[in-house]
Structures are given as structure tokens and as C-alpha cells.
Amino acid sequence: MTVDNETTMTTHLGSQALLIVKQGPQIGIQFPLTAERYTIGRDESCDIIIQDAEVSRRHSQISWTEHGFVIQDLESTNGTFLNGSQLGSATPLKSGDNIGLGQTTLMFELQQAADQPAFEHGSPAQQSEQAGGKRGATSSFSGRRQRWLLVGCGCLLLLCVCGITAPAILQMAGIVDLATIGQGLGF
């Protein structure tokens, strides 16, 4: 099969390849695979940045071939594992595969749209361009930041509720006389 830059790499039509963080600091984040090649690691220059101290700066690489996606270790310190076995060379990925990098586990998934036929031409990057997709994680916040944002909003809501209801409750209990306090403050 001849491959040129504009067409002819065959992939499942409507399939969207994803890496989903199943374990580690970024749990729940999804990385759509819409380009020809992804470098995975801690370094800011990587396409997929994993915030895990046990992951090398440039740990592994996922590439598109005419047969599908493959993963290979980039001579990382702690190795790359596929379904529990350490990688020795470029290995094909299939939906449901678990990729181990340090303390992080990523699941490779192919999601097929129900309204699409079985096959189409074009690389993942070409399919993404046609669909108007962008490269990178689908979440703008990491899991830790999302939790802190939620905790902060909850605390703010609690303070508002307490500030509104506490004086009324204290007055009903006879502990505080709001009219006297208001006069003392000039209201």
C-alpha cells in the first residue's frame, strides 16, 4: 500500500482514538489522538504531558501507521508497559489496552460513531481537520485543580449561606437582638 501525505491511510471511519488517564495524578483526563505522532512524557515539549515524577521527560511515543496506532518506549528510565508487559519494540495498540508509565495508567480506546460506515480514508490528523478538532487534552483543568475549584466554590457558598441565615437563627434562639445591633451600627 502506498501512502502519500494527503490521503490513503485507512482507519476505522468515525473512530476516535483516545488515551484516557485511568490511574495517576491526572485521572479522568482524555487525550484525543488526531495527529500522526505523539510524544508522551513530563517535558513541556511533549505532545502529551504526564505529571508523574516516575515518568521520563520523553518517555514513549504513539505513532500512526497504515495498520493503526503503535506505541514504543523512548529508552525511558522506568520503561513503558502494555497490559502489564514491558515493551521491547514498537507494538500495535488495540482498543482497551492499558499503558503503564510510572504510576500512571492510560487506556487506549477507539470509539466508533454509530452513524458512520465501517471505513474511511485519511489519517487521524486529516480526519480531525475535517471535523474541526484540536490537538490536546479535552479538559482545561487537571483533576487536582478541578477538585480545588469545587472545594473553593463550596466554601464560598457555605459562607454566603451562613452570613444570611446565622443572624436570623441567632435572633430566633434569643441569643442576639438584631434590632439592638442595627441601632448600634447606625441602621
Image: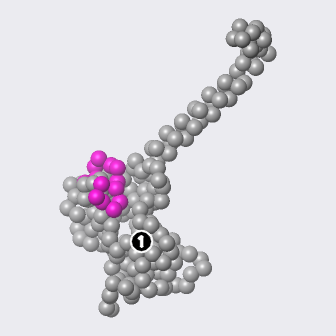
Is residue 140 in view?
Answer: yes
Residue positioned 49% across, 72% down in the render: 132
Badge 1: few (under 14), some or many (20 or more) residues near its Cα, within 10 Å?
many
- Reply above or below: 166 against 92: above
Residue positioned 63% across, 34% down in the render: 157
The residues colored magenta run: 44-56
- Mark 1 = which residue? 34
Quarter location, residue 164: top right
Q: Which of the image's four quarters has the C terminus?
A: top right
Q: Is residue 158 left or right of residue 9?
A: right
- Reply above or below: 120 against 83: below
- Reply above or below: 42 against 169: below
Is residue 95 in view?
Answer: no
Residue 66: horizontal and vertical position, in percent? 35, 83
Q: Is residue 97 left or right of residue 76?
A: right
- Reply above or below: 135 against 77: below
Residue 150: horizontal and vertical position, in percent? 55, 41
Task: Please name the amino acid that badge 1 sits on.
Answer: Thr
* Dominant secondary structure of the residues highlighted in magenta in the image: loop
Q: Nearer the viewer, residue 160 or 183?
A: 183
Question: Is 46 one of the magenta-colored residues?
Answer: yes
Element marked by disc 1: loop
Residue 87: horizontal and vertical position, in percent? 26, 65
Residue 168: horizontal and vertical position, in percent? 76, 20
Question: Is 123 one of the magenta-colored residues?
Answer: no
Q: Nearer the viewer, residue 104 or 133?
A: 133
Residue positioned 42% across, 83% down in the render: 122
Quarter location, residue 167: top right
Q: Is residue 155 left or right of residue 81?
A: right
